[in-house]
Amino acid sequence: MHFFQYRSGELYAEEVPVKTLAEQYGTPLYVYSHTTLLRHFMAYENAFDGYPHIICFAVKSNPNTAIIRLFAKHGGGADIVSGGELHAALKAGIPSRKIVYAGVGKTEDEIRFALKSKILMFNVESENELREIDRVAGNMKTNAQIALRINPDIDPGTHPYITTGMKKHKFGIPIEVALEYYKLASKLKNVVVVGVHKHIGSQITKVSPFVDALKRILLLIDELNAQGVSLQYLDVGGGLGISYRDEEPPVPGDLAKHLIPMLKDRNLTLIMEPGRSLVGNAGILVTKTLYMKKGIEKEFIIVDAGMNDLIRPSLYDAYHHILPVVRTKRDKILCDVVGPICESGDFLAKERELGKLKQGEYLAVMSAGAYGFSMSSNYNSRPRAAEVLVKGRDHVLIRKRETYDDLVRNEKIPAFLK
Ligand code: LLP
């Protein structure tokens, strides 16, 4: 459920007409709803209330510090995958002991930064990385709290590009050899084994893959206990899907109903790393129609947002609803909604039935709050979009639109070309 609704034919973000925002801040524009973000976060908090837990927001889904801040203020932690995300999480006020750090390619500098910041734990993805963390921690005369990221070999039934927990993927340590790795970790001088981690994929629309993966992880925990290794943290990752078109994914309450009974009497703190299910439906991308173009085979609506602003349709063939910001009675057309980028893959929708539009009208690309701005780029030298947070009648610019100067700011023309 989200707070982007029509009122008398006009699309509102909470109490503000989206058209007003588009006119004030320009387009392309990302608009987020505070009430929606909070509602989604509290759905997790309430569902897992009564079982020790930390909701670590997956920063990669939307790294705007205002959004991270909102979750920090309500007790959230952060799941990070880079030094940049650690910087953003700390700046936004996430307590370092609520930060977990995954990713297969942590650099020495990043490891040092995380150790200096005293994060809760590294989710370690390989033997090399484990030894590197041990070495860096030793040099810094400190200890690193670690969990091993286990690859449980579960197919979550989602898009291949966002499936992560099967044998063929680069992520995690194969469950078959997990015990050996735990033994190795417990021998290393500068690491302290505190947990286990798994994350099997994203946009998962059933509870069963979560249950199946957890069953495997719990068997591993039992074996570890038998060998005298006891863990404090069980990090089950993120991955809960949202409704883009007509999917009916489980809600956090459904997950809790299935997972909590499995964890009874285990004395573990549960960590979850939701990204999409917190921010996805809490954000839209507002764009303006530039031209209507009648091709020989089909019609194109050319808008001012492109694949550089929202790459999901181009990259995953992802579906996003596209709604007119002002709804009137219109004749229907079948069209592709495309951006200004010089690539045939630059589209926001293909073969979509939409009402006939005029030049200069606004459209809202729905469910764009996760992996929208965060995957945007400057391709075709396009300044990245502005981001606005709406709370009731208030709206605040939480990231200003980039300028042409921003695009060349870090570049330098060498003397020999002057
Ligand atoms: N934890 C880890 C270790 C992850 O790798 C991810 C996402 C998450 C948590 C959060 O997953 P979520 O709750 O958002 O499903 N760009 C793709 C999604 C890539 C997901 C990468 N990892 C997309 O636009 O669909």
Image (spheres, grey):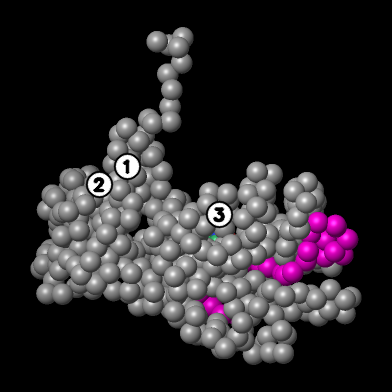
For label 3, the crowd category at 10 Å Cα-Cα, with few meaning under 14, some 14 to 19 and many 20 or more, is: many
Report, in whole angstroms, how far the alpha carbon at label 1 lies from the one at label 2.
Answer: 15 Å
Question: In screen coordinates, is 167 left or right of 54?
Answer: right
Q: Work out whether residue 187 can be spotted.
A: yes
Say which quarter of the image contains residue 352: bottom left
Frontmost residue, 208 versus 54: 54
Q: Residue at (57%, 88%) from the top-left corner?
A: 50
Q: Name the amino acid, label 2.
A: Asp
Q: Which residue is mark 2?
A: 304
Q: Name the amino acid, label 3.
A: Leu
Question: In screen coordinates, is 182 left or right of 78?
Answer: right
Residue 259, given in percent of the width and then of the height, sits at 62, 84
Q: Quadrant of the C terminus?
A: top left
Q: Nearer the viewer, mark 1 or mark 2?
A: 1
Q: Which residue is mark 3?
A: 86
* Element on which disc 1 rests: loop
Frontmost residue, 248 versus 413: 413
Q: Residue at (73%, 62%) from the top-left corner?
A: 146
Question: In screen coordinates, is 183 left or right of 1?
Answer: right
Q: Name the amino acid, label 1.
A: Glu
Residue 199, given in percent of the width and then of the height, sits at 62, 66
Please say if the residues under marks 1 and 2 sit with CB atoms less than 8 Å apart: no
For label 1, the crowd category at 10 Å Cα-Cα, with few meaning under 14, some 14 to 19 and many 20 or more, is: some
* Element on which disc 2 rests: loop
Q: Magenta span has 182?
A: yes
Frontmost residue, 38 versus 169: 38
Question: In screen coordinates, is 11 left or right of 125?
Answer: left
Q: Quadrant of the N terminus?
A: bottom left
Q: Which residue is mark 1?
A: 402
Res 7 label:
none
The magenta span reads 180-209
